[in-house]
Image: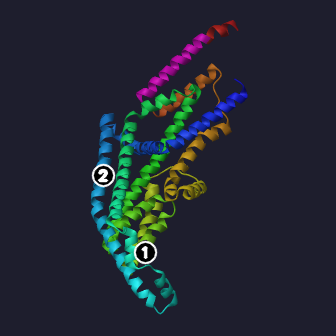
């Protein structure tokens, strides 16, 4: 096959691969999210494996995760429903008052805006529909959307469970398709990629839950209106890099000033303090993650934010971690050159001596000792094979 034909086939295969990725982008995204979830839970599973069997450790971690999610939902659904209803009623009452008073206001700006506002009855009909059918359709659409989101969450959880159980087997399977010389580097790259993204997911999830609970307690004590709703939103904005410090207080001011300005100002100050403490104290100390370049994160956040909106900003840190890991493992080794490979028995014996010094300072596990013994056997075999050649020389 000529060089032109090979290049043509390679281009066609690349285009077909990109087309398939785009066609199945949703299942691929669900799988990647499942792998990230499994990677975030792996340290806890490995810690439990020291005391129980691997299967039981996986079951305990995922059961605890599922029960925790269900408990949070049960605790939050009731207060959230009440806050949403109260907010909707308050907005409706405020709009009716504005629509009635502003057209007769003495200020020209308020009078102009008031005359442009639609009648409240017309607005309600436009939002709910002229008949009951659109309302039923809207409720059905909302239920369908919530059910779809719940189904995707369960799918991610199940895929993550399967990956946690059999990830070693799957890794060995797809690594066998690669050339033998590159398997070690690809395995290290994949493991570091999992570790970096997993640490990020674990840190982010913990910050969202803890900050939401702490904000909820503080808002309730300070008398901030819609405490549950604002606490949930304040926890969610922790996903947005940098802006979370400002978004949480702004949400309190936006929803609270219309009801209780004093409580809103106190709540905004409290949210600012909580966000700063989580960003600069709790997260670096208790939830460390891979260090990345702020400039790189800014560029990725801008690109993904412009292209995908808020979801792009949420996924930008994970993409940044993946880029850093791939750069460290794939670009820097190629730029620095390949590591030196021993070319003589003397160099092998020198390396073996250095390894023995390390083991003398920190004895390894039985598996490591077994591997070292096998290396000793291979070196001895190499010396035996090389001895006749040296005698002839």
Q: Nearer the viewer, residue 69 or 348?
A: 69
Question: Which residue position holds label 2?
Answer: 68
Tell me which numbered mark, 2 or 1, is placed earlier along the sequence: 2
Disc 1, SS: helix
- The front one of 321 and 356 is 321
Question: Quick check: 258 above or below 74?
Answer: below
Q: What percent of the width, then of the height, locates residue 206?
A: 39, 54
Q: Pointer 1: what residue?
A: 253
Q: Main secondary structure of the magenta part?
A: helix
Q: Is residue 75 magenta?
A: no
Question: Image point 37% across, 72% down: which residue?
Answer: 125
Disc 2 packing (10 Å; few <14; some 14–19; many ≥20) = few
Q: Position of residue 366 (x, y in %)?
A: 41, 27
Q: What whole-number distance in Å separates the C-alpha atoms at marks 2 and 1?
A: 31 Å
Location of residue 2 (image quadrant): top right
Q: Work out whether residue 260 can be spotted.
A: no
Q: Position of residue 373 (x, y in %)?
A: 48, 21
Q: Is residue 279 visible?
A: yes
Between 269 and 71, the one lying in front of the other is 71
Tell me the colour scheme of the image. Answer: rainbow
**Residues in magenta?**
365-385
The quadrant of the picture occupied by the C terminus is top right
Q: Residue furthest bottom?
A: 106
């Amino acid at each position: 096959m000529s060089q032109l034909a090979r290049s043509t086939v390679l281009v066609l295969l690349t285009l077909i691969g990109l087309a398939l990725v785009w066609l199945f982008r949703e299942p691929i995204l669900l799988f990647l999210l499942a792998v990230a979830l499994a990677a975030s839970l792996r340290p806890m599973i490995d810690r439990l494996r020291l005391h129980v069997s691997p299967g039981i450790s996986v079951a305990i971690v995922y059961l605890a995760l599922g029960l925790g999610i269900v408990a949070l939902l049960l605790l939050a659904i009731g207060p959230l429903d009440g806050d949403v209803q109260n907010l909707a009623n308050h907005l409706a009452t405020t709009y009716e008052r504005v629509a009635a008073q502003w057209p007769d206001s003495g200020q020209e700006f308020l009078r102009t805006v008031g005359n442009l506002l639609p009648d409240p009855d017309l607005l309600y009909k436009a939002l709910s529909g002229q008949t009951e059918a659109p309302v039923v359709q809207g409720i059905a659409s909302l239920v369908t959307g919530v059910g779809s989101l719940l189904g995707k969450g369960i799918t991610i959880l199940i895929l993550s469970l399967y990956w946690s159980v059999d990830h070693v087997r799957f890794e060995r399977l797809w690594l066998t398709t690669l050339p033998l010389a590159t398997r070690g580097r690809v395995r290290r790259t994949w493991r570091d990629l999992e570790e970096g993204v997993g640490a990020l997911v674990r840190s982010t999830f913990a910050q969202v839950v803890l900050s939401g609970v702490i904000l909820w307690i503080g808002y309730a004590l300070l008398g901030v209106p819609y405490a549950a709703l604002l606490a949930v939103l304040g926890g969610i904005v922790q996903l947005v890099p940098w802006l979370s410090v400002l978004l949480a207080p702004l949400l309190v001011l936006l929803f609270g000033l219309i009801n209780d300005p004093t409580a809103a100002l106190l709540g905004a100050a409290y949210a600012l303090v909580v966000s700063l403490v989580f960003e600069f104290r709790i997260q670096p100390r208790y939830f460390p993650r891979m260090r990345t370049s702020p400039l790189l994160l800014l560029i990725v956040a801008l690109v993904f934010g412009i292209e995908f909106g808020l979801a792009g900003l949420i996924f930008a840190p994970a993409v940044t971690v993946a880029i850093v890991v791939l750069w460290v493992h794939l670009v820097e080794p190629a730029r620095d050159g390949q590591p030196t490979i021993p070319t003589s028995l003397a160099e092998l014996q020198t390396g073996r001596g250095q390894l023995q010094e390390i083991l003398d300072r920190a004895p390894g596990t039985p598996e490591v000792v077994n591997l070292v013994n096998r290396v000793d056997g291979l070196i001895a075999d190499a010396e035996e094979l090389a001895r006749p050649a040296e005698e002839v020389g």
